[in-house]
Image (cartoon, rainbow, N blue to C red):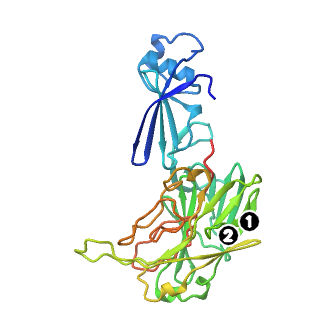
Amino acid sequence: MAAARRRICALAVSAGLAVTLIQPESFPLNGSATTDDECASPATHLEFESEAVALATACGVPVEISSAGSPDTEVFAEPDGQVRVSSYVEPIRARLDSGEWAPIDTTLSTHSSGRIIPANTVFPVSFSPGGDAALAVGDNADGRFALSWPDPLPEPSLTGDTATYPEVLPGVDLTVTATAAGFSHALVVKDATAADNPRLAEIRFGLQTDGVTARLSESGGIDLLDAAGEQVWTTPTPQMWDSPESTSGESEEPQRRVADIGVTLESDALVLHPDVDLFDGAVYPVIIDPLWNGGGCAAGSGPPCGPNTPPPASGSALTPGATTRPSARPRWGGSVTTTPTATVSPRPMWSGRCSG
């Protein structure tokens, strides 16, 4: 319970944004009175609530209470003495090394370590520069895990938030994509000949963990749990679908074919079992796409740490957060290739728990 009791005065909810106004009944203001010089160029944020409220009311400007915010929440002291809380369905910012908040930036570049990293995301993730290095490594305060491709990787090309490793199998590219609180990946199958590769019937990724334990979930996905048994990373049932193109003049999206993907956990591997029957008569690209979400990021009903779903199939409803979604793209990562080729995308998306 905070030192000052508060009364909720208003609650407004809009698409993707919830705003709550909280009225402090009393605030002991610490420090000296605000001066005219301070109001001439007031601070935009202060660490403590009492200081922020004092500055906001004295200078007539909103002041962010930096210690009260989180990656998906902003808290402001308002000039009328109220405190405004803006909560978003996904992280909009992350802390820099300096401790300051800065907007999410998933642009990839090569770090001095040689790994590929995004500019500013909630949890540290890094991607392989090629060779035998792990495809993707995810870190947060609760633990660490690494995914690896079974063969040496080619050097990737970088475009925005996505690294593309060409021809990891004949006619198949592998992509990894940084998200606000994790990453996703996908296999891009370029034609029906590539889809006949027996390795696409059982797609193996090496999985190493440190501080977390992997288990199959009741929904058919995978949870990574910390030492206390709390969910740190999770995925609903992975799915795959094809990608029919709209015909000029059609008013509805074409109906895509969708199938669940089986998942097996071994001591050091994650194995995906796509429904290969979907390849027969499929319209390419075809997406094979397990989705990873952070446990704490899944609060609320929206997609946890960044939507990563395909357009809904005709006549289907997209339910954010559902574990069975006829048109939802399971993910732990990647972007969808929209060329007239087949995209098999085991793109599970891994996201860390959004704790304060």
Disc 2 element: strand
Q: Amino acid at mark 1?
A: Gln
Mark 2 or 1: in front is: 1
> In the depicted view, which residue is nearer to us: 99 or 10?
10
> In the depicted view, which residue is nearer to us: 241 or 343?
241
- Position of the C terminus, as image quadrant, is top right
The image quadrant that residue 113 belongs to is bottom right
Is there any visible trace of residue 288 in the rendered image?
no
Give the left or right position of residue 334, taking residue 133 as reference: left
Provide residue 265's location: percent of width, then percent of height.
71, 73
Q: Amino acid at mark 2?
A: Ser
Circle 1 sits on which residue? 208
Outermost residue on the left side: it is 249
**What number is the disc on residue 258?**
none
* Disc 1 crowd, CA 10 A, few/some/many (<14, 14-19, 20+): some
**What number is the disc on residue 148?**
2
Nearest to N terminus: mark 2 or mark 1: 2
Provide residue 311's location: percent of width, then percent of height.
39, 67
Q: Residue at x 48, y 62 (%)?
A: 308
* Disc 2 crowd, CA 10 A, few/some/many (<14, 14-19, 20+): many
Q: Residue at x 57, y 76 (%)?
A: 261
Provide residue 284's location: percent of width, then percent of height.
43, 80
Q: Residue at x 37, y 77 (%)?
A: 255
Residue contact at pointers 2 and 1, CB within 8 angstroms = yes
